[in-house]
Image (cartoon, rainbow, N blue to C red):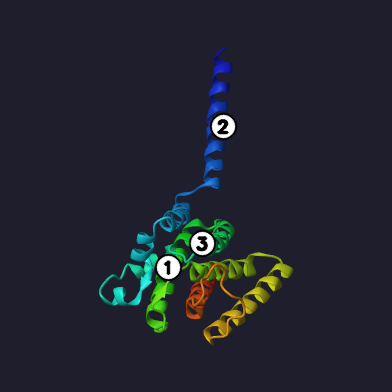
Amino acid sequence: MQAETVNIVRGRVAGAAVATRAGRGVFSPADALPVAVVLAIVLVQFFPAAQAMLQFDRHAVQDGQVWRVLTCHLTHWSWSHLAADLAAFVALCWLGRGRPYRLFAMLAASFAAVGLTVDFGAGDIAIYRGLSGVNYALLGWVLVTLVVEAGRLTRITCISLLVVVAVKIAFEVAGAGLIPGIGLPDGIATVGVAHAAGLIVGTLAGNKTRN
């Protein structure tokens, strides 16, 4: 009887350990930022007043509302614009979740870098909304990370994709966008320097991950 009791206790302990490891595989504390970003973006879209308060507004930033440099990524021009950005964001975060704390740091850096680039490098932009710059940071980070970790064919594919994306962004910076932004209203164009800043941040972060 005593031996059976010991075995039952051991079985419960082992089961709890397996469940804990499984839970860590599904969700870690560093996953909180991507989840919070998704929830915040969807919530903000329901409230036009919140969008107006959080979007990048050059005159408001100059008047001291500097939080807009970060919060502009939570605002979108339409539900289709939001859906496209979030689909890419969720997919890329999932691909990068093997290094959750590096993902956390990279997201924080890209939020700041892209917003500041719009502020200082896109003087003709009065209002800015969207997550695309952060998505390009995620894309660069994932591709560069895969270059060192994957097989030869995958490495070649990732490098080729990185080159294609860089060329696309170069055209956008030059004012000749090759692909129109999804869900953008008339008169609103993609901001090439925001995409460029994101890709640079992600590529640098990916190279750091490799070292």
In the image, is 35 to the left or to the right of 166? left
Q: Of the residues shown, which amino acid type is indicated by label 3?
A: Leu
Q: Residue at x 59, y 70 (%)?
A: 144
Residue 210 lies, in percent from the top left, at: 56, 68
109 in relation to 14, above or below: below
How many angstroms separate mark 2 from mark 3 (CA)?
A: 41 Å
- Give the quadrant of residue 109: bottom left
Position in image of residue 101 (x %, y %): 47, 58
Task: Quadrant for residue 60, please give it.
Answer: bottom left
Q: Residue 209: x percent and y percent?
A: 53, 67
What is the crowding at mark 3: few (fewer than 14 residues within 10 Å), some, or many (at least 20)?
Answer: many
Nearer-the-camera pick, 63 or 92: 63
Question: First in sequence: mark 2 or mark 3?
Answer: 2
What residue sits right under mark 3 in the picture?
82
Specify few, some or many for label 1: CA neighbours under 10 Å numbering under 14, 14-19, or 20 or more. many
Closer-to-camera residue (102/135): 135
Is 193 on the left or on the right of 4, as rendered?
A: left
Q: Secondary structure at mark 1?
A: helix
In the picture of the structure, the residue carrying the numbered disc 1 is 111
